Amino acid sequence: MITSLLIANRGEIACRIARTCTELGIRTVAVHSDADENALHARVADTAVRLPGSAPADTYLRGDLIVKAALAAGADAVHPGYGFLSENAGFARAVQDAGLVWIGPPPEAIEAMASKTRAKELMGIEPLRDVTESDLPVLVKAAAGGGGRGMRVVRRLADLDGELAAARAEAASAFGDGEVFVEPYVEGGRHVEVQVLADTHGTVWALGTRDCSLQRRHQKVIEEAPAPGLTGPLTEELHALAVRAARAVSYVGAGTVEFLVADGRAHFLEMNTRLQVEHPVTEAVFGVDLVAEQIRVAEGHALRGDPPRARGHAVEARLYAEDPSREWAPQTGRLHRLAVPDAVRLDTGYTDGDDIGVHYDPMIAKVVAHAPTRAEALRKLASALDRAVIHGPVTNRDLLVRSLRHEEFTGGRTDTGFYDRHLPGLTAPAPDLYAPLAAALADAHGRSRFGGWRNLASQPQVKRYLMDGEEHEVRYRHTRGGLAADGVQVVHADAELVVLDVDGVRRRYEVSRYGDRVHVGATTLTALPRFPAPTARHAPGSLLAPMPGTVVRVAEGLTEGTPVEAGQPLLWLEAMKMQHEITAPVTGTLSTLHATPGRQVEVGALLAVVEATP
């Protein structure tokens, strides 16, 4: 019987595992890097052990330190969560060799499926060895790990070597394994997966399907269960293939078998020998706690009776600190407030006042809705996200809401190319033109009413705000009856709430301010100073860091004076576990190079300058 469990992970999954352990009466031990010293997962655990350093390679990927932490804290089991060491057979063996219970499949099963190349061979599928023009497009993919890291779509043969190098570097950084392979890229396919759960007594359950087709950079954004629009025979085939994969490696515990579905056919992708990020939608539909089942199986218990029956539909959205309109650039900063309606499930590793840093994945939370039908679940989740209070860095919240309400998605016709087709429309600004006025009126609350006691109208007050990249100027006046603005009746105004009547329709705005950032309902504004300070000027062709991060690579042979072509990759930044390519803006000569591997940079830091050819 497990009494104390170390969670070898961080963030929302560590908090989610801790929640189940508490319900089961199991004490929890957290591990944390220096960057995560005050993180929520370290605070909710009964005990926390420091892993010195901040980079994943020095902390959450150090299996020796994690085993040592488990023994020092008196834990008798280890749960790996997902990512990091969750699919590392060596780590699983080290846990078992230390006399601890491993909450996961046998190391031999992990080894068989951890390499996507070996997994495909096990299922009778060979990767591409020598790529030719006729094979294009192809997908370069990391053999280990997941989450879209180490993946590149290649449409030109000339780009293959560069993308292979980039994928290897990213995979080595994320998983400690730089092995990659090449496979055909299935255009317009749907990403469908099957949840499996197996015990040590020979029982394997296939707990339905999930559709995870809405992806950016091969990383899932919205997932749902069951996968919509599949025929009965295709669903049965997917279940059978998933059970076959699990039995082929004598699988134990929770795992996921992933497929691409195109033209009514299932193409095996891989088996993830761990819990998936999107496991809550399966939990909601089948009424199970997969973490609790993992623990029961690890204790030697058999799965109870027949598989549970599916009920209703569930949808999960991943809330990221990122800007989809700027090539999904990750964002950092203080998360001042996070609150969603109680009608949905919130799995998060953050709470009010926590900082979102540069070292780890930018996912803030997972928001999950369950309802009797798919249409009801989509409406419920979209509404909850729309009403959510999210004060802090830029997020993908608006993108999620628009995606959930998009006719192609609501009609169940999506595939993995959804964002390639629709991203510009989904990220187009839709400003609330009355939000700046509400911000100005809230800011004016309590100020002296210049001219309010006179019969003469006071001079208008002027405030300027930046909204969706555009400057907005608003004017209002202090009058005998209170604050006033042309064309709008001010029903109520104080520092936190403004109510406006516009053509007989009342608009209610809750206002919060953090420095020069103002949150007006779901709209974020930046208050501009009355007298702007001089800004630094950069030479034409300057390459500025689009995000905080670390320079991990500079193109081979690149030095000052090197001629470059427009679009040529010059250097790579790593931020939040993803590598971001910085390319030459014009054809010309590299006149300045400040970037060196290992250098930490902030947003807006000058990396290089390319002088255009006259």
Image (spheres, grey):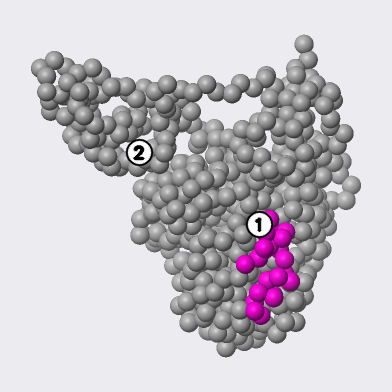
Quarter placement of the N terminus: bottom right
Residue at x-position 61% and y-position 48%: 358
Residue tagged by mark 1? Answer: 54
Work out whether residue 359 can be spotted.
yes
What residue occupies the far right of the structure in this picture? 130
Crowdedness near tag 2: few (<14), some (14–19) or many (≥20) residues, C-alpha within 10 Å = many
Residue tagged by mark 2? Answer: 520
Crowdedness near tag 1: few (<14), some (14–19) or many (≥20) residues, C-alpha within 10 Å = some
Residue at x-position 62% and y-position 59%: 34
Q: Is residue 67 magenta?
A: yes
Q: Which of 404 and 613 lies nearest the eye of the viewer?
A: 613
How far from the left and from the top, in percent, is residue 277? 57, 60
Residue at x-position 65% and y-position 33%: 605
How far from the left and from the top, in percent, is residue 525? 41, 34
The amino acid type of the residue labelled 1 equals Ser
How far from the left and from the top, in percent, is residue 65? 71, 70
In the image: residue 126, left or right of residue 98: right
SS type, badge 1: loop
Q: Which residues are magenta?
A: 50-72
Q: For residue 56, what is the image quadrant?
A: bottom right
How far from the left and from the top, in percent, is residue 485? 23, 24
Q: Which of 293 and 75 lies nearest the eye of the viewer?
A: 75
Quarter placement of the C terminus: top right
Q: Is residue 525 magenta?
A: no
Q: For residue 555, what is the image quadrant?
A: top right
Work out whether residue 415 can be spotted.
no
Say which mark, if any, is on residue 474: none
SS type, badge 2: strand
In the image: residue 263, left or right of residue 43: right
The amino acid type of the residue labelled 2 equals Val
Q: Which of 240 and 355 lies nearest the eye of the viewer?
A: 355
Cα separation between marks 1 and 2: 35 Å
